[in-house]
Amino acid sequence: MLASLPMYDLPALHGAHDRFWQGIRNALGYGPETLTRTGNLWDHWQAPDLLLSQTCGFPYRAHLHDKVQLVASPDFGLDGCPEGYYNSVFLTRRADGFITLEEVAGKRFAFNEAMSQSGWAAPKVHLDSLDIPLGSLLQTGAHALSAAAVAEGRADFASLDAQTWRLLEAHTPLGEQLAITAHTVPTPALPYITALGQNAEEIRTAMERALVHLDASDRAALGLKGLVTISSETYLAVSTPEPPQI
């Protein structure tokens, strides 16, 4: 049996995530003793003995929706987002003084990976709706690396999950170097999932109980305000753009 909480697991948050998991496991009365932090995420998400993990909305709608069950969606209390939703922030260097997306039209864009809702799909759909073209592309492999590429001048702008940016601001110097230029339209947040053979409702109840009893400092560190039920149909209705041409 496997459990992982990989999507916001910065080193500074390992302890909080471990304690959240122990609360979930205690409420369930079963489950692996520790979270898995190694291996390929696609292997986690598609493991037949997956008890709990967290994926991105794009992989869910593209490949996982008929292979896993939704458990819940996190609510991070993000400004401008309904409960259980999130958005992306467009980031530019403070020193460049860009204040509108029109000013970065045709400039070099850093993104984490092609199958990222917040790093590629949401920003591409948003820019297309405004008829703002991208210039050359830089694929970085991670949101933090996209932010670093902008800070270091290897790219002119990037798009990050707003909750990831909140965490990077708290735990890295990037907040002093980068500024938010715009936000995308909110979409459903990164869902918690379980394998088809598991009891999704029981797991959700255990997560709710664990969150209630989680220390206030851990809840604040994770930024997790609560859990929301969002339907599979809502995730599947989110627009998917053309893949990046690198």
Image (tube, helix red, strand yellow):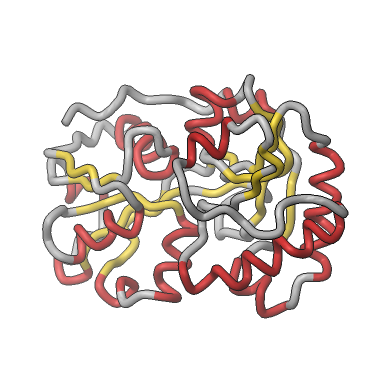
Residue drawn at point x = 68 percent, y = 71 percent: 219
Q: In the image as oriented, which residue stretches furthest toward the bottom?
A: 217
- Give the quarter of the figure containing the C terminus: top left
Q: Quadrant of residue 203?
A: top right
Where residue 214 appears, x then y in whole percent?
A: 76, 71
Q: Quadrant of residue 124?
A: top left
**Residue 11 left/right relative to 36:** left
**Residue 202 left/right relative to 245:** right
**Residue 73 left/right relative to 207:** left
Q: In the image as oriented, which residue stretches furthest toward the top?
A: 66
Residue drawn at point x = 28 percent, y = 59 percent: 147
Q: Quadrant of residue 243?
A: top left
Where residue 2 appears, x then y in whole percent?
A: 65, 45
Residue drawn at point x = 68 percent, y = 35 percent: 49
The residue nearer to you, when weighing 6 against 124, is: 6
Where residue 217 appears, x then y in whole percent?
A: 67, 79
Residue drawn at point x = 26 percent, y = 53 percent: 100
